[in-house]
Amino acid sequence: MKPLNPLILRERNIGLQERMDDPECDLQTLFRTYDAFDFVNRRLTGWGGLYETYIRPHLRAQGGVGTLLDVGCGGGDVTRAICQWAAADGMKVSATALDLDGRALAYTKERGFVGQAEAKEGDQIVYRTGHTRDLKEESVRFDLIITNHVLHHLTQQELTEMCQDAESLCHEGGLVLFNDIHRSDLGYGLFGLATWGWFAGTYIREDGLRSIRRSYTVGELRRAVPSHWTVMERFPFRVVAMCRGESGKTSKELNHQTLSPHG
C-alpha cells in the first residue's frame, strides 16, 4: 500500500529549531527531557520491533555478540534499551553512544550511567562526545549502526555525509538502521493530543511537534539518501533508512519484512 502524503503538512518546515538544540536552553529542563525520552522512545519509536525484526537476528547470526554505534544518542536511552534486550536474550552488545553535544555526556554522568569521562575497558556502553569522522580517523568499525530522530535535524549535505560515514564505519555485511519520524497530519494531531498536559518541565511536547513538521515522508527520504539504501515506512508513523556495510549490498533482501507493523 502506497504511503499517504500529508495534506496540511505538505512541506518539511526545516526552518523550525527545536528548543533542546539551543545551546542556551535551560540545562535541567534538557536533562528532564532526556529522562522522559526513556519513556517516550520505548513506546513510540518502534525500536522494539526493529530489534525483533533486524537486530536480534543479526546478532544471533554472528554468535550472539556484536558492537553497536548509536549516532546522536542524546541521553543514550535507545542504546541502553538495545543492550538490555540483547542481554535478556542471552546475547551481549558492546556499544558506543556518540553525540556532538557535550551536554549529553554531562547528563549520563549526572544520572550515573557513566562514572568518568573515559569509560573503563570492558564496560558495556561507552558514552562519548564527538563526530563520526572522529571514529573514522580511529579506524574503528561496528556490527550495527543506528540513529534515532537524527535525520530531520540534518542538511542534505550532512545527511549524505552521515550515510557515507555509517557505511565506512560498518563491518562488511553489518547493518545500518536510521530511524526517524514519518511526517503525517494524523501523527501530528495524535501526538499533540497524547502529550497535552503531560511532560511539564520538559521540551517533549513542543520539540516533538516541531520534529514532526521537520521530518521526512518515505518518498522524500528515498530521494535524500543514496540510491542503494532501502527506505521503509513502519508503524507507528516511522520512516527507516537501512543499508549494509561496505559489502556493496543493499538491504533489499530484507524487504519481505520491511512493511511489517511492529514496534
Image (cartoon, rainbow, N blue to C red):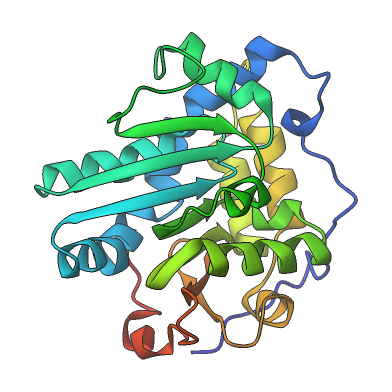
Which residue ends up furthest to the right in the rendered image? 15
Residue 98 in sight in this render: yes
Residue sitting at x 47%, y 21%: 118
With respect to residue 18, does 170 lie above or below?
Answer: below
Residue sitting at x 79%, y 66%: 8
Q: Nearer the viewer, residue 143 or 251?
A: 143
Q: Nearer the viewer, residue 25 or 105?
A: 105
Q: How many marks?
A: 0
User: Where's residue 7, x and y in %?
Assistant: 76, 73
With respect to residue 129, does 224 lie above or below?
Answer: below
User: Where's residue 41, x and y in %?
Assistant: 45, 42
Residue sitting at x 46%, y 73%: 245
Residue 202 in sight in this render: no
The C terminus sits in image quarter: bottom left
With respect to residue 159, does 30 lie above or below?
Answer: above
Location of residue 62 by image quarter: bottom left
From the viewer's perspective, is 160 left or right of 164? right
User: Where's residue 155, x and y in %?
Assistant: 82, 59
Q: Nearer the viewer, residue 249 or 200?
A: 249
From the viewer's perspective, is 227 left or right of 235? right
Residue sitting at x 55%, y 18%: 107
Which residue ends up furthest to the left in the rendered image? 90
From the viewer's perspective, is 89 left or right of 165? left
From the viewer's perspective, is 53 left or right of 135? left
User: Where's residue 167, x and y in %?
Assistant: 55, 69
With respect to residue 132, does 159 lie above or below?
Answer: below
